[in-house]
Image: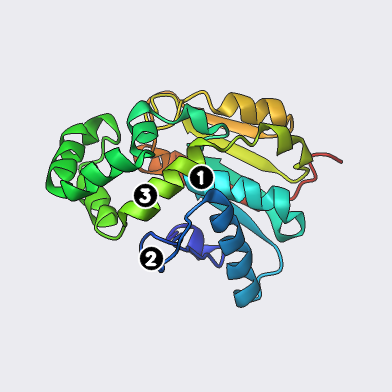
Amino acid sequence: MAYLGRYYRTYALDFWGFGESGKKRETYAVQDFVSLVNQFMDILGIVNAPLVGHSMGGTVSLSVAIQYPHRVSKVVVVGSPIVGTSLALPLKLAGYHFIASILFNMMWAFRGGLRIASPFICADPRFPKMMDNDLTKTTVESFLLSISSLHRTDLRPMLSQLKIPVMGMYGDRDNIVHPRQWQPLAQGVPHARIVRWPRAQHFVMIDEPQDFMEKLKNFLDQQENPTG
């Protein structure tokens, strides 16, 4: 955001149940977050803008573009599941209440496990601290219900509705979301631009920061009509 902020006005929002957003809701489904983005743009008076989302944020961004096409000029997804069943097995299991409750009731063990596993998720040494900070701002309900909803999501039937520029950015070593989720995106949106990094994992923007920023800015800068 610091890099793109030199050239664009940028906004970041926390989904309900995460970060600084409210955590007293009955549902934390993907559709709730789609509505949240629409309301966010309404309140700030943003008529139309590009959306960039990582992981579940990219799935939500694509869904916003499908449901509110007048809102979105371009979409960029980063390591995002197009089909929810592509989530890694530990995340699928975390979508069950019993397992999610155990994880959050034994948060010290959960955090310890993540620290041990962090090199297999992201090579940056700052990652464990960043993830730990995020976990302290997440509730078991939001974690459980959002992952469960994401697991049930399948955008393939709606992808053909996208007529705006789309870019998918994926790491070939992603072990959170299946690294070949770019394939259903490319099949459903033939004009989509796909960028892959052979050595990057789930957090492409951390693993390949310079190349990631340059390719993202280049895509946002271009004036094009892919279906015209």
Q: CA distance from mark 1 to mark 3?
A: 32 Å
Q: Position of residue 181 (x, y in %)?
A: 54, 27
Q: Is residue 126 visible?
A: no
Q: Alpha-carbon distance for marks 2 and 1?
A: 35 Å
* Residue 194, x across and y down, in percent: 60, 31
Quick one: label 2, few (<14), some, or many (20+) residues within 10 Å?
some
Locate residue 1 relative to residue 106 in the image: left or right.
right
Q: Is residue 92 visible?
A: yes
* In the image: residue 59, left or right of residue 156: left
Q: Report the Cα–Cα distance between label 3 and label 2.
A: 11 Å
**Mark toward the start of the polypeptide (3 vs 2):** 2
Percent x, y for residue 183? 60, 24
Mark 1 element type: helix
What amino acid type should be assigned to the residue bearing mark 2? Answer: Lys
- In the rendered structure, the answer to whether residue 60 lies left or right of residue 12 reads right
Q: Which residue is mark 3?
A: 143
Secondary structure category for the residue under label 3: helix
- Rendered residue at 60%/75% (across/down): 44
Residue 23 marker: 2
SS at mark 2? loop
Residue 23, percent across and down? Answer: 38, 65
The correct choice, above or below, for 170 with respect to 25 in the image is above
Amino acid beneath label 1? Glu
The residue depicted at 55 percent of the width and 57 percent of the height is 32
The vertical placement of 123 against 33, above or below, is above
* Residue closest to the eye, 40 or 203: 40
Q: In the rendered picture of this protein, how many numbered marks are placed on residues?
A: 3
**Circle 1 is placed at which residue position?**
214
Q: Quadrant of residue 122?
A: top left
Quadrant of the frame with the C terminus = top right
Q: How is the image coloured?
A: rainbow
- Residue in the image at 71% along x and 48% along y: 66
